[in-house]
């Protein structure tokens, strides 16, 4: 009996020693989507990690299902996502294999907007101006979460409206033309977006809470990542990017900079902040 317990104790001690002696990652694979909120967050983090001596590779995915599967397999180490709302289905499906590492930003908002000169402030007032806009809400890509929530809002509020499928580019062109002519329009929008910075629009209040509240962006990883990489985890935990900064970066891209140029300029302007983020992870 004593020999048996000694063998178990020795095996446990051996496993602990192996785990404790395992080197942290020095090369980090970041996954992202090519969207105007996620790209700046990913590239700012890339700059931070490289500043602290890590080699960083960024992989762009075309849709969330592919991205979550790659993360769960370990093809990438980290991914930014809004797991409480936008990607809750994918998180629920994979959460036994994944973990939340840290918060990187907060404030994603989606909803119905109108030009700021229109005389309504709430979704439940839309029927009163139906005739001015032909009973149409101008939408974007039909598969987006924002379009799904807008259809639910039409139902919940009893709106006598049709949601028009389209594309973001077509919506932007129509919104810009409408604002220039000071005409009425109902459409959908989100923040962070350069459009909220450039266009004078207002989000309509949502008293029934059909649209998600402001959402949080998390770094997520394969389960066990934080335990295996404590310094890297602390480095990420020190990072927080205000949503307003993401909006400004996207405004600069709209004005002609590349995303890399806009992020590089942000990093130069916030060099002291980057140093503060790194302080907690210092050896």
Image: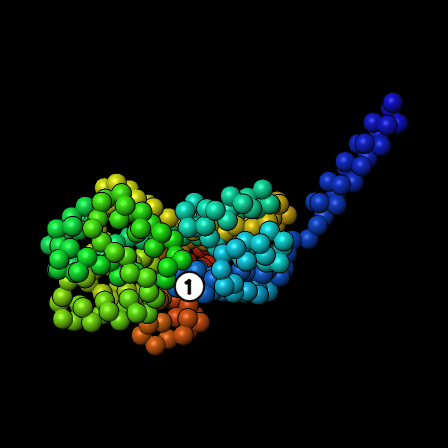
Describe residue 78's horizontal placement relative to residue 194 as left or right. right
Identity of the residue drawn at 37% across and 48% down: 215
Q: Nearer the viewer, residue 72 or 273?
A: 72
Q: Quadrant of the N terminus?
A: top right
Whole-percent x and y of residue 173?
26, 71
Depicted 32 relative to depicted 225: above or below: below
Colour scheme used in the picture?
Answer: rainbow
Identity of the residue drawn at 42% across and 68% down: 263
The crowd level at tag 1 (other Cα within 10 Å; few <14, some 14-19, many 20+) is few
Displayed quadrant of residue 192: bottom left
Identity of the residue drawn at 62% across and 58% down: 75
Whole-percent x and y of residue 242?
36, 55
What secondary structure is marked by label 1?
loop
Say if residue 12 shows up in the picture.
yes
Say if residue 242 shows up in the picture.
no
Tell me the residue that label 1 is attached to: 35
Number of marks in picture: 1
Describe residue 153's horizontal placement relative to residue 216 as left or right. left
Whole-percent x and y of residue 87?
45, 50
Q: Residue furthest top?
A: 1
Describe residue 179's horizontal placement relative to residue 19 as left or right. left
Depicted 4 relative to depicted 247: above or below: above
Identity of the residue drawn at 18% across and 68% down: 178
Displayed quadrant of residue 26: bottom right
Whole-percent x and y of residue 39?
44, 64
Q: Nearer the viewer, residue 264 or 131?
A: 131
Q: Nearer the viewer, residue 91 or 215?
A: 91
């Amino acid at each position: 009996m004593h020999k048996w317990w000694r063998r178990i104790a020795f095996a446990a001690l051996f496993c602990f020693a192996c785990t404790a002696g395992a080197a942290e990652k020095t090369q980090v694979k970041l996954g992202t989507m090519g969207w105007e909120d996620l790209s700046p967050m990913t590239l700012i983090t890339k700059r931070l990690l490289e500043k602290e001596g890590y080699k960083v590779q960024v992989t762009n995915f075309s849709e969330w299902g592919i991205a979550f599967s790659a993360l769960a397999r370990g093809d990438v180490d980290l991914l930014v996502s809004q797991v409480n709302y936008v990607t809750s289905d994918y998180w629920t499906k994979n959460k036994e294999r994944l973990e939340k590492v840290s918060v990187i930003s907060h404030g994603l908002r989606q909803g119905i907007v109108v030009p700021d000169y229109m005389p309504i402030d709430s979704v439940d007032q839309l029927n009163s101006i139906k005739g001015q806009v032909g009973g149409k809400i101008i939408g974007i890509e039909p598969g987006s979460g924002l379009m799904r929530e807008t259809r639910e809002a039409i139902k919940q509020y009893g709106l006598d409206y049709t949601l028009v499928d389209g594309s973001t580019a077509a919506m932007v062109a129509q919104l810009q033309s409408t604002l220039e002519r000071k005409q009425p329009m109902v459409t959908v929008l989100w923040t962070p977006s350069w459009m909220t910075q450039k266009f004078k629009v207002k989000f309509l209040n949502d008293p029934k809470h059909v649209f998600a509240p402001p959402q949080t962006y998390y770094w997520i990883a394969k389960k066990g990542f934080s335990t295996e990489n404590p310094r890297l985890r602390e480095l990420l935990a020190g990072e927080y990017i205000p949503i307003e900064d993401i909006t400004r970066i996207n405004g600069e891209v709209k004005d002609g900079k590349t995303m890399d140029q806009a992020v590089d300029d942000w990093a130069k302007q916030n060099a002291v902040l980057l140093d503060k983020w790194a302080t907690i992870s210092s050896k």
